[in-house]
Image (spheres, grey):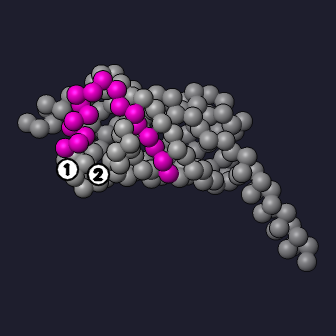
Amino acid sequence: MKYIQRLLLFAFIVLSFASCIEEPEFKDVSNFKIDEINQNQVCFNADVSVYNPNGVSLKIRKSVFDVYADDIYVGKAHLLSKYKMKRKQLNTNNVPVKIVLEKGVFLRLLGFLRKDKVELRLKGILKGSAVIIPFRRKIDQKKQISLDDLNINLKGLFN
């Protein structure tokens, strides 16, 4: 009986702690480098700046998000590696991402290159862990991105 009580107490503490984790705040993207682009997917690396408002370091695991550009569904973005976010700091990490494009959206994406800014929206489940306790957080964040700041050069990719 004591074993069951201890197990329930431990489960209660773990669940309570996991629910206290606040959502990290997306701030900026820089050093954008496209590795591969075709009609089905876009693979790139970017330095992503995110503020961790929590009192503990977070380890972000591979996660999947829906990506929207100016309210047009682009596809599923897959974080390809884990990274760590220090507590109560603005963290900048190089993040490799693969976006599996929705059918027919590739030509629409090329149209965005004529714009100065695009509103990028990420929606999905962020997976991670704090200390050793895993958590999942629904995120739905929007950010205006200046395409000039990303220095996207597509000429070399199509030659």
The boundaries of the magenta stretch are 107-124
Image coords of residue 115 (percent x, y): 27, 27
Image coords of residue 142 (percent x, y): 48, 36
* Residue 114 colored in magenta in the image: yes
Contact? badges 1 and 2 (CB < 8 Å): yes
Image coords of residue 122 (percent x, y): 46, 43
Left or right placement of residue 43 versus residue 131 in this view: left
The image quadrant where one finds the C terminus is top left
Q: Could you say whether the residue bearing mark 1 is in a helix, strand or loop?
A: loop
Q: Nearer the viewer, residue 59 or 113?
A: 113
Q: Amino acid at mark 2?
A: Leu
Image coords of residue 4 (percent x, y): 85, 74
Give the answer, above or below, for where 126 lies relative to 69.
below
The image quadrant where one finds the N terminus is bottom right
In the rendered image, which residue does mark 1 sit on?
Answer: 39
In the rendered image, which residue does mark 2 sit on?
Answer: 101
Which residue is the extreme one toward the left? Answer: 159
Left or right placement of residue 17 versus residue 118 in this view: right
Q: Could you say whether the residue bearing mark 2 is in a helix, strand or loop?
A: strand
Q: Report the residue at 60% width, 53% height from top.
A: 136
Res 62 seen here = no
